[in-house]
């Protein structure tokens, strides 16, 4: 059976999904702090988003989770965490693999 979904369609799905991520909200000791997306890596059908916490004011505070948000402040992805920020930078990573599936309709 021939492949229904062509590579270009998958490329469009990756590009579209990536375009919706705007910033992150990180739960630092119960307070939501806005952070920019530090880096994005797209490899094939996988999107990786990284948030970097270098702030000295959050040293010793508990990082309880992070959310990726769109430009209207809506949550797109959540990642629970439970770590204490040390005096070094802290990198939070999100990974998304885009897959599409077609089912035959008779």
Image (spheres, grey):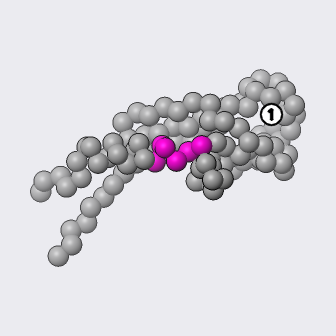
Magenta stretch: includes residue 39 = no
Residue denoted by label 1: 85
Quadrant of the image for the C terminus?
Answer: bottom left
Instruction: Tell whether 94 sits left or right of 80.
Output: left
Q: What residue lies at 30% left-to-right and 58% top-to-bottom?
A: 101
Q: Residue at the far top: name it.
A: 88
**Residue 22 showing in the rendered view:** yes
Say which quarter of the image contains residue 58: top right
Instruction: Tell whether 64 sits left or right of 18.
Output: right
Q: Which residues are magenta?
A: 17-22
Give the percent coordinates (x, y) of residue 77: 59, 52
Instruction: Tell whether 67 sits left or right of 86.
Output: left
* In this view, 37 is above or below 30: above
Q: What residue lies at 25% left-to-right and 66% top-to-bottom?
A: 103
Say which quarter of the image contains residue 90: top right
Give the percent coordinates (x, y) of residue 73: 66, 53
Q: Secondary structure at mark 1?
A: loop
Along the viewing direction, whichever of 45 and 82 lies nearer the viewer: 45
**Residue 81 showing in the rendered view:** no
């Amino acid at each position: 059976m021939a492949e229904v979904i062509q590579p270009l369609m998958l490329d469009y799905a990756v590009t579209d999904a990536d375009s919706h991520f705007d910033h992150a909200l990180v739960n630092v000791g119960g307070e939501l702090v806005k952070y920019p997306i530090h880096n994005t890596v797209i490899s094939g059908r996988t999107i990786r988003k990284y948030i970097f916490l270098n702030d000295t004011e959050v040293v010793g505070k508990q990082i309880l989770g992070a959310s990726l948000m769109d430009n209207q402040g809506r949550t797109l992805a959540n990642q629970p965490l439970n770590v204490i920020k040390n005096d070094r930078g802290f990198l939070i990573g999100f990974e998304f693999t885009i897959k599409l599936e077609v089912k035959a309709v008779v």
